[in-house]
Amino acid sequence: MVSKWVGLASLVAVLGTLTRFPPYVVGQTTLNDAWDTTKGLINLLPNSFIIHFDGDPGTDEGQKNAADFFTQLRSLGISYTIGFNYTAIMNAASIKVEDKYVDTMASLSMAQNVWSEYLSSGEKMDNTGVRALPALAPLEHEITGVKKVHGTLKYTGKGVKVGILDSGLDYTHPAFGGCFKTSGCRVQYGYDFVGDSYTGSNAPVPDNDPMDQCNGHGTHVAGTLAGNDGNFRGVAPDATLGIYRVLGCNGLTTSALILQGLELAFKDGMQVINLSLGISGGWGGWDAWAEAGMANIMTQKGVVIVGAAGNDGDSGMFGMSSPAVALGVVAVTAMEMPKFYSLYFNLTLEENVPIRRSDHQAYLPQLSILDKQLRPATNANGDDFGCGSVVDLTGTVGLVKRGSCSFTTKALNLIKAGAIGMVVYNDVAGEPGVLSFDQEISIPAFSITQADGKYVLDEIAKRGEVRVRIKNDLLPFNNTKPYNTPGFTSMGPSPEGQGKPDISAPGVNIYSCLPKKMGSYGTASGSSMASPYVAGVAALLIQAGKTTSTEQFYSALIHTATPQMTGDSYISVAQQGAGLVNAYGAVISDVVFSKRFLLGEFWDNAELYGTSNSHTFRETFSNTGAVSAYYTSSFSFAQSITSFDSNKQLTATPIVGNVRPKVTIWSTSVVTVHPGMSRAININLDHNGLVNGTFFIYSGYVLLTPRSNYKGSAMAIPLAGMAYQSFDAPILPPVSTGLPCLVRYSEGRCLSGTNAFTFKGGDFPTVVFRIQLPLFRLRIRIAKAATPNKIHASVVENHYFKLAKNMPHHKVTYYTYRWDGNVFHSDNPSKIFPISRGEDYVLMMMFYVTNNWNPFIYTTPPITATRV
Ligand SMILES: *[C@@H]1O[C@H](CO)[C@@H](O)[C@H](O)[C@H]1NC(C)=O
Ligand SMILES: *[C@@H]1O[C@H](CO)[C@@H](O)[C@H](O)[C@H]1NC(C)=O
Ligand SMILES: *[C@@H]1O[C@H](CO)[C@@H](O)[C@H](O)[C@H]1NC(C)=O
Ligand SMILES: *[C@@H]1O[C@H](CO)[C@@H](O)[C@H](O)[C@H]1NC(C)=O
Ligand SMILES: *[C@@H]1O[C@H](CO)[C@@H](O)[C@H](O)[C@H]1NC(C)=O
């Protein structure tokens, strides 16, 4: 899964000129809230960089550039240590050097890019299902066409090499052949770069064996991609696997290790790589593996890279994870399916009525409660919270409502009343969750939904008594929201306005493998579960002979997806991309589109499109097959959505509206493309009349529906655009939030007037700020208070590039910048000195939405150093 880390992106070697503009005015400077200044710190691996040198890896020229770079550093008196030299894909090295030299390094001509290194965290599976669950047939293959590709076309990924960078794999699981690298094994490649105890900050302990028995994430996703165990068959059940373990048991790693993993996967000849790691709120050009980095170079060399969109959907739009956000990477988002497996119990009425339930405590044996009464644990007042003494429950399963007291209290009360089990029904809507206790509880206990609780209580009221049968057993249940994009899955577009995500795949309650020690099988949700599904489909396409380095491959994979609707309108392209993956359509498709996405961002690209409010795009499609293609063409809008309310404040749930341009299509409605021929569709977007001051992303699909005389796949090309200019968008929250503000580090309360700081202990000036959209760059400078618009000097950490926006659902919904009182002048970064005592200074926080737009500037109240 993707990291929940909300820290800082990396640095790129772009140095713009500084423009001075009027300060961004903050009306309210005093808040009652104290900010926890230790939590919101801008966060990256200090003094750690990846340098991308000019020249190809492994060539004399490339090596010379790297050597010259280091010679230059030495001649400037800058000390450094080299961690790892990359020589296969990208001419680069990981190095340790003091942060203050970043601008100097970026200015050296041999450095193409200078990226900061950061910690990245994966996710760990819940270790709750420690009982052996059976190998069941996946429920989604019928809907995605995978079943038909396996059955009718007989493609199973055989002979295709798929690389997985994740937490490793329990290859002793029967779904992976039980062996590693020996003849005939499914897993033929792999390496452990980290070791079990790697935490991201200690020394990695690499070895040859990528076994995972402690984390489980890699095993679950490898199961979806390529598991093969009786009824349980992943998407590409015969693919050859390479397992590159870059996450230890706790799921933390660094950029440098991921690049090592990618490099080995490339050397091993992996054709499809599923990247297990993500950073919330990425930029395409964010880091060493995305746009300008390894992933893109590998894509150009024909390696298909698939990544998860991320699980930050409830933080609003523009929330794609890196590296999925990179253009070359296929970004996959999760979608709900019509059916999923769940644990359950039967209410034995005239017939059995299965009721979904959570798992019970891991330390208890398998559940087997057969034909026992289920009785509400009411008390003398008639409530059923189970918080005090309850009715006699001897030999029965007690039913209680969630709330009022802890689960432990409820369970102890039920045990006292003689119960042999406890069912807690939810008091709010939501999934049945595993109950947690603060001591071991001797009777099995689990939860059910609010609606099921009500149903069971109604049956008891009607009948006087009901009985249950509970085993450790799963059944398929109907989903009430089939084909919806779940709220958790990250939304596009990319910070640069590119069309993302690319495609949707099953990602909610997905049943797949777990390490044997963790129960062998279990369900999980996330875009992590969706991305290996598409990686598997990519493997099927490769076996079917599609060429990966061309648009043919991406058209087959992406444009055959099926756009899904909510009510009677299509779900926004920013949520579902091209739609639900269609493996059968992808394998049989012959039509290739010239562009992956149509983008309506011409307002922001005046240099390309001029300043007109209207622009016509041309999309050509060609037939690479042997028979003529006959289609009907049409255009349909999808929902327009925004994450900003009328106060320009970021909201957790997107707002649906009707803001859209006028769209005109020139094409005959019946389109014929003969083999080897191309046709074009012209699409005009007219932005006249859009409402200024709203921030909607509009979208839609050009749909090609096969006519009855053609057996090809239906195709759709997504279109998306901003109904506003990006520099109008509210990067900072409304003034009513009181942010940004200046605080004392140890206090966290917003200050006004002139404030003295000792720059000792907790007494540092600190700026608390929140950004509502991904930020291209934050520059921090100081000015003298008397001339607040005139830059006086740079602070030591003066450049933050590509910050992720603050995420409402994360605990850290703001950043803090703590100034240590040291400065330098840009013409001499090696000379660091403290500011003068007794003089008044202000910090200038310069927020850049894009590289070339004027910043919003926030200037703090005056700061006086009493002691430095
Ligand atoms: C990495 O390459 C540099 C030259 O670019 C060389 O001086 C150094 O010894 C190499 N380090 C390792 C660990 O291979
Ligand atoms: C595929 O990549 C996504 C993130 O990009 C990750 O969450 C998932 O674990 C990966 N799957 C495998 C099989 O490595
Ligand atoms: C529950 O009922 C279903 C449907 O009748 C049946 O298939 C299943 O075996 C039953 N399970 C238990 C634990 O009795
Ligand atoms: C589940 O959905 C199917 C149709 O897909 C329907 O036939 C069946 O009755 C539904 N089951 C329940 C329990 O609602
Ligand atoms: C939208 O309104 C703002 C403020 O009124 C103005 O500065 C901006 O130019 C307008 N944008 C367009 C595209 O009309």
Image: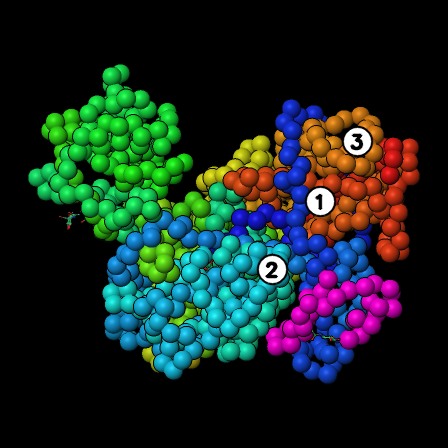
Tag 1–tag 2 contact (CB < 8 Å): no
Q: Position of residue 140 (x, y in %)?
A: 30, 59
Q: Residue at x 19, y 25 (%)?
A: 392
Q: Position of residue 300 (x, y in %)?
A: 56, 73
Q: Nearer the viewer, residue 213 or 384?
A: 213
**Which residue position holds label 3?**
861
Residue 743 among those drawn in magenta? no
Residue type at the position of mark 2: Thr
Q: Residue at x 33, y 51 (%)?
A: 129
Between the C-alphas of marks 3 and 2, the distance is: 37 Å
Q: Callout 1: 10 Å neighbours few (<14), some, many (20+)?
A: many
User: Considering only order in the chain, which callout, 2 or 1, is on the residue closer to the N terminus?
Assistant: 2
Quadrant in the picture for the C terminus: top right
Residue 77 among those drawn in magenta? yes
Residue type at the position of mark 1: Phe
> In what element is the residue under mark 1?
strand
Between the C-alphas of marks 3 and 1, the distance is: 17 Å
What's the magenta region?
67-96
Q: Nearer the viewer, mark 1 or mark 2?
A: 2
